[in-house]
Image: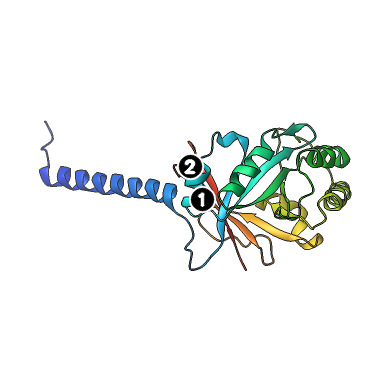
């Protein structure tokens, strides 16, 4: 015997589906456009790398970027050969500029420091360098022990800070902080990262926060990591 159709039930299901689609669309759009309020964080900017492609610096500045951090080097051998031109272009639009080194837990500290100082000149007008620290199974499948990691990192920091003549900022991921507790062990300003929700994993006040990795601006073809400063 055929089941009777229930028009009211079908209309209800269609309405619920429409609500779900609208909610998903709103969440998708919000994720692409959300930034922390200027009333809460007056100084805001971006973290870019050469993977972001061509940057329209005028549009980036017009979108509210007061500063930009540029990935200058990674590990012992990767470097951005266009770093100097990007610094000039950003400064030409009135933005302050800082350099980022992506630290490899498995690579020799001295070689990493040499890679960084090859790209980044000693420049009193540069923002303090930021050192991005994370656990990356691709480059470092066997993470060193805490004592070895801290010893190598200390060597790296000493050499880089001697070159730039200022203290660096430690950009620590939640995974690395959970394992090594660097924020408590090393006395440097902390840069944290977590989309949309202000993080507390560092266990102490932070000065910079990558608040979203998904911001879409006309300044680049892809998503931008948007960063705010806490005073």
Q: Residue at x 59, y 46 (%)?
A: 90
Query: Which one is in front in this view, the residue at disc 2 or the one at disc 1?
Result: 1
Quadrant of residue 7 within the rendered picture? top left
Q: Residue at x 73, y 37 (%)?
A: 74
Residue 18: assigned label: none
Q: Considering the image in quadrants, where does the N terminus appear?
A: top left
Q: Position of residue 138 (x, y in %)?
A: 70, 32
Q: Position of residue 22 (x, y in %)?
A: 29, 47
- Secondary structure beneath dot 2 equals loop
User: Label 1, on which residue?
Assistant: 61
Q: Residue at x 34, y 49 (%)?
A: 26
Is residue 49 or residue 87 the one in the foreground?
87
Quadrant of residue 82 within the rendered picture? top right
- Secondary structure beneath dot 1 equals helix
Q: Residue at x 53, y 39 (%)?
A: 55
Whether residue 134 can be seen here: no
| Outermost residue toward the front in this view | 92
Is residue 125 or residue 45 the one in the foreground?
125
Q: Are marks 2 and 1 in contact (CB under 8 Å)?
A: no
Category of crowding for the residue at label 2, using alpha-carbon neighbours closer than 10 angstroms: few (below 14), some (14–19), many (at least 20): some
Query: Is 48 placed above or below 76 here?
Result: below
Q: Which is nearer the N-term, disc 2 or disc 1?
A: 1
Q: Position of residue 183 (x, y in %)?
A: 75, 60
Is residue 169 or residue 53 the one in the foreground?
53
Q: Position of residue 72 (x, y in %)?
A: 70, 40
Q: Is residue 3 left or right of residue 191?
A: left
Category of crowding for the residue at label 1, using alpha-carbon neighbours closer than 10 angstroms: few (below 14), some (14–19), many (at least 20): some
Q: Is residue 191 left or right of residue 150?
A: left
Q: Considering the image in quadrants, where does the C terminus appear?
A: bottom right
Q: Is residue 72 left or right of residue 15?
A: right
User: Label 2, on which residue?
Assistant: 219
Label 2 vs label 1: CA separation?
A: 9 Å
């Amino acid at each position: 015997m055929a089941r009777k159709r229930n028009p009211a039930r079908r209309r209800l299901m269609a309405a619920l589906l429409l609500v779900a689609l609208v909610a998903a669309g709103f969440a998708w759009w919000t994720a692409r456009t959300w930034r922390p309020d200027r009333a809460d964080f007056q100084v805001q900017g971006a973290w870019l790398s050469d993977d972001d492609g061509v940057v329209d610096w005028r549009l980036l500045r017009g979108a509210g970027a007061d500063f930009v951090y540029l990935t200058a080097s990674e590990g012992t051998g990767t470097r951005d050969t266009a770093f100097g031109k990007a610094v000039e272009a950003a400064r030409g639009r009135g933005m302050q500029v800082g350099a980022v080194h992506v630290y490899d837990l498995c690579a020799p500290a001295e070689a990493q420091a040499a890679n960084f100082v090859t790209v980044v000149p000693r420049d009193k007008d540069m923002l303090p360098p930021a050192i991005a620290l994370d656990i990356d199974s691709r480059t470092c499948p066997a993470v060193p022990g805490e004592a070895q990691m801290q010893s190598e990192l200390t060597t790296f920091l000493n050499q880089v800070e001697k070159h730039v003549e200022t203290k660096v900022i430690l950009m620590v991921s939640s995974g690395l902080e959970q394992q090594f507790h660097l924020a408590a062990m090393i006395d440097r300003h902390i840069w944290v990262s977590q989309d949309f929700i202000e993080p507390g994993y560092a266990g102490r006040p932070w000065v910079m926060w990558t608040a979203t990795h998904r911001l879409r601006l006309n300044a680049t073809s892809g998503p931008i990591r948007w960063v705010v400063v806490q005073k």
